[in-house]
Amino acid sequence: SAVISQKPSRDICQRGTSLTIQCQVDSQVTMMFWYRQQPGQSLTLIATANQGSEATYESGFVIDKFPISRPNLTFSTLTVSNMSPEDSSIYLCSVSPGGSEQYFGPGTRLTVT
Amino acid sequence: QKEVEQNSGPLSVPEGAIASLNCTYSDRGSQSFFWYRQYSGKSPELIMSIYSNGDKEDGRFTAQLNKASQYVSLLIRDSQPSDSATYLCAVREVKMNTGFQKLVFGTGTRLLVSP
């Protein structure tokens, strides 16, 4: 498995602003994943981030809205840009150290007012 | 996108009973299957993975896979109130042309274990 930390754990933001979420892993991993979990819903993959290349975004998610950085093998950031109340959600990063099983960080609970 | 279906529940069982959670998936080529437990306000926790047809046991948990029927289940024996949570089924989807992999999650089944 892996030990994953996220910052911030929660935040309340105003409409139109941006928030950057950090994800740190205790070991080097090739791929990091960013998910969104809206209230009462399951997990939806936003994008997959490989070190040294552009992130791969899922249908319905675009880089301008959710820019991702992956500067090294243990760290990634997800920015939620120009936020609206519809972006209120839990944002989760996950990793797959062995390439099969996937482990999740504690999540960032975002409320947009 | 390939689909993963779960009954949303809640599934209510008394303490000590067997809880049976079910999941079906649409991609016949899927090879990897996972069960996550998510307590309210917490992130998903991996509890079981299964890759071959048949049963896989880990403590009170048994995962069952039937690829012909495209069906995977999770049995929880001697259910405890602490097992009350949402259980998410996830299936690995692989794009043949690129090898790109991702997990597709079901909507989860809420389990309530009453004392």
Image (cartoon, helix red, strand yellow):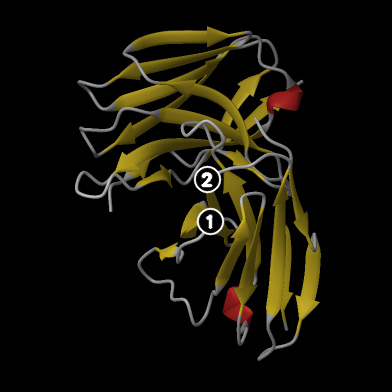
Q: Residue A23 at x, y = what percent? A: 70, 56
**B90 or A74, nearer to the observer:** A74
Alpha carbons under labels 1 and 2: distance apart: 7 Å
A69 to the left or right of B25:
right
Q: Residue at x 59, y 31 (%)?
A: B46
- Residue A51, disc: 1
Q: Residues within 10 Å of mark 1 (few under 14, many from 20)?
A: some
The chain that hosts pointer 1 is A
B112 to the left or right of B10:
right
The vertical placement of B41 against B66, above or below, is: below
- Asked which quadrant contains residue A104, the reply is top right
Please give the residue where the numbered disc 2 appears in the rendered image.
A30
Q: Residue at x 75, y 24 (%)?
A: B81
Q: Residues within 10 Å of mark 2 (few under 14, many from 20)?
A: some
Please say whether residue A107 is visible from this viewpoint. no
**A14 or A80, nearer to the observer:** A80
Whether labels 1 and 2 share one chain: yes
**B35 or A79, nearer to the observer:** A79
Q: Residue at x 52, y 8 (%)?
A: B57
**Dot 1 amino acid type:** Gln
- For mark 2, give the secondary structure: loop
Question: Do labels 1 and 2 touch, CB within 8 Å?
Answer: yes
**Dot 2 amino acid type:** Thr
Q: Residue A112 at x, y = what percent? A: 70, 79
The chain that hosts pointer 2 is A
